[in-house]
Image (cartoon, helix red, strand yellow):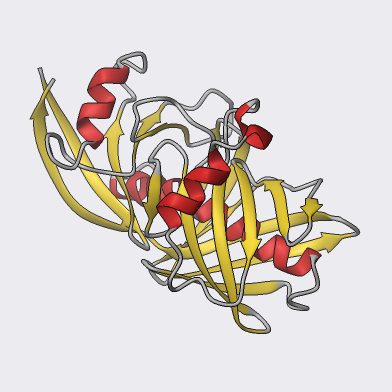
Amino acid sequence: MKLNFFKYQGTGNDFIMVDNRSLILSKNDTTFIRFLCDRRFGVGADGLILLEKPSNAGEDFKMVYFNADGNESSMCGNGGRCLVAFAKFLGIISDRAAFTAIDGFHEAVIEDEKISLRMTDVNQISKSENNFFLNTGSPHHVIFSEDVTGKDVKKEGAAVRYSPQYMERGGTNVNFVSPVDNDTFQVRTYERGVEDETLSCGTGVTAVALAAYFSGRTSSTSVTLNTPGGELEVSFEPSGDEFRNIWLKGPAKQVFKGEITC
């Protein structure tokens, strides 16, 4: 069987997109999904995303996300934004979207070639010395330092991801952060499932923005995050130690389309 696919990227975080409304691709075929994401033997991507028929009335589609290791994973912010762009390409939506992902309901707005995605509310942030942990649809460990330029993100990130602190709960993503100014931060992220640094991580920069505000490193409720793959924006409404109305904003573009034998 021939599988048609599309490749999208959001600030360098790249994804294979499949229109799976007819259920042509099995969600249980971990080996094939891992093959598709392989950068040498397959298409190559940080993950694969299936667009499927909505499960709930009033929604436009459902998002099913797999990491590059072939396993279904937690929420992917940049992937969600790219999927909204894909849905527009398919003619499913125009400039607004409503959909369900593994972490629940999301809405999105397309404006001036940028896509804003509403993230889930965050009710808790844990602090340990200079580090923070929170779940923004995916688990994230945030480490603030003076300069992240010379960090060995793969080595240091893996050490945290596989530490006893996190292994019992399936590991964590790890973000290394340094301030640029009051409302701008530089971010590098180690992603579990990819098991390496990615050029950008949407749930990661969301976690960074909230942790920066929570720890008093910024007084702004609209934060700019510079990643190796480009610039993202996160806005939010703080309510005590909780955060509501969280939006992740940035570009999402189609790179190419193709066909591959299943």
The residue lying toward the viewer, choosing from 77 and 42, is: 42
Residue drawn at 61 percent across, 41 percent down: 137
User: Residue 239, position in %: x, y?
Assistant: 88, 59
Residue occupying the far bottom of the picture:
181
In this rendering, position of residue 17 left or right of residue 164: left
Residue drawn at 50 percent across, 71 percent down: 148
Instruction: Give the answer, above or below, for where 58 lies relative to 71.
Output: below
Please say whether residue 81 is visible from this viewpoint. Answer: no
Instruction: Give the answer, above or below, for where 40 lies relative to 77.
Output: above
In this rendering, position of residue 254 left or right of residue 70: left
The residue lying toward the viewer, choosing from 157 and 63, is: 157
Residue drawn at 59 percent across, 41 percent down: 138
User: Residue 240, position in %: x, y?
Assistant: 91, 59
In this rendering, position of residue 94 left or right of residue 116: left
User: Residue 132, position in %: x, y?
Assistant: 72, 54
Residue drawn at 23 percent across, 21 percent down: 32
